[in-house]
Every structure is written in structure tokens, then in C-alpha cells.
Image: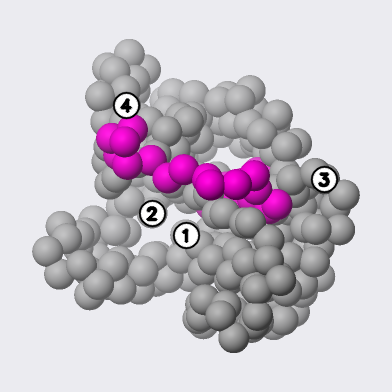
Amino acid sequence: MVAAAYMPQVKGFPDALAEQALDDALASGATVPVLAISGVQGSGKSTLAAQVVARAQARGLNAAALSIDDVYLIRAQRQRLARQVHPLLITRGPPAFEHQQVKLADERLPEAQWAALDAPLDLLVFEGWFLGTPAQDDAELDSPLNALEREADPDGRWRRWCNQALARDYPALWQRCDRLWFLQPPDFSVVPRWRWQQEQNLQAAQPGRHGMSRPQLERFVQYYERVSRQALRALPDRADHVVVLDGQRQVQAVR
């Protein structure tokens, strides 16, 4: 077993929470447990995933994290969908944009740069903004819920296409997750602020990065709003554990 003194230091949630999530995943009985961490943008999914991996490594386990962000379709594929189905499909993120490759910004890394495992995994931590989320009932798609949908999807073609993909392509993936943890915010209204904080942190870490302005980000978040709100409604009853967060992302309870 690796000594605790050599454990990578990852700031974020309380260590006890990462330990609880790790113990829960290992107790699933799966040969290689898949711990799914779901939450809206900016809720801390990747931070918690990194903490769980670090705690697992401290126990001598071979663990890795994978994000839904790592497997989006490349721009050329989205351009084809935008021409064939709906112009909004050019923007990566909503359901149906996942592909089994690794991305770099808007494209995939060259295959030679893909990460390789040097030993079989003991644990995979899978994080993403809509993991475990079910599709909406068709009638719920009738009315647009934000400016993006009113202006760019008035007939509902885009949101119905995404919802059909969520219903068709994802349940089999959700079933492969042995445990689902949901990071629950107070409500959707915190998402633009949290995502803006994330954008600012990325810009500070990468000064040459071409980031979004606040108005651009507010518009970008609207692409995710419908499925995010569906996650907020459905996942508290579907997840194995719910981590209740306040507006500052502080843990208030674990259910």
C-alpha cells in the first residue's frame, strides 16, 4: 500500500467525502467499479473525481478518471450534424455529442498522445454534467424555456433531437455505472455564476487562452439548461448518494 504521505494533494471537497465515495464504489462488488459523479456545470465534479482517484492511489489501487468532456464529437462531425439536422448542433455539449476518443479543446488529441494504462484498473471514476439523467416526456418539450430555444429552436427540432438521443443512446451507459453520486446545487440559478468562476479560473491559469465574455457564457449555459433542469428534478431520486451544496459549493449534507 502507498503511504499516505505520498498521496497527491488535491484541494476541494472534504477528504471524508472523497473517502466515502471511494468506499461506496469499492463496496459495489464490481470487478472494476465505475463511480459516476454527476452535477451541473461548475459544481466540482472534476475536483471530486480527482480527490477520489488520489485517495484510491493512496491505498495502492490503480484508479483513473474520465470526463464526458473527453469524448465529444469533433467539430467536423458536429458541422455535418448542423447541416443535416439543426444548426444548434454545431455546439458541443448537449446529449449525442459523445464519441469514444479524447479531445483537446474542440478537437481530439492525436492518437499517439492518448493516455495509456500501464496496469489493469481497480477503479474508474466517470464524471459529467448529465450522467444518469433520463429523457424528458415529449410533452415537456413543447414550450421553449430560454432565449436560445425561443430564438434558435422555435419549432423544438433541436431539443427533441437531443432528447431522443438521451432516451435512445444513454440508458445502456448509465447501467454500466456501479454507483452514481449527484452534486446537487440549490437551483439552476447558480450555474451561470459557477460556470463564470470556472471560466475566470481557466483564463488565469492559461493567459493565452481564448475565453468567453460574460454575455457569451450566459448564452452558452442556455444550451445545457434544459437537460440540467431535468437532472435537478430526476437525479435526487435516482442517485445512490446526493451531495447537497450551498451557493458557495460548500457541502451541507450527504444523503
Q: Which residue lies under the disc numbered 4? A: 78
Q: CA distance from mark 4 to mark 2?
A: 18 Å
Q: Is residue 145 left or right of residue 199?
A: right
N-terminal of the pair, mark 4 or mark 2, is 4
N-terminal of the pair, mark 3 or mark 2, is 3
In the displayed structure, would residue 167 be above or below residue 198?
above
In the displayed structure, would residue 144 be above or below residue 142?
below
Amino acid, disc 3: Ala
Q: Which residue lies under the disc numbered 2? A: 221
In percent of width and height, residue 29 lies at 87, 49
**In this view, the mark in front (3 or 1):** 3
N-terminal of the pair, mark 4 or mark 3, is 3
**In this view, the mark in front (3 or 2):** 3
**In this view, the mark in front (1 or 2):** 1
In the picture, the quarter occupied by the C terminus is bottom right
Q: Which residue lies under the disc numbered 1? A: 41
In the displayed structure, would residue 49 be above or below residue 204?
above
Local SS, label 1: loop
Give the residue drawn at x 65%, y 73%: 2
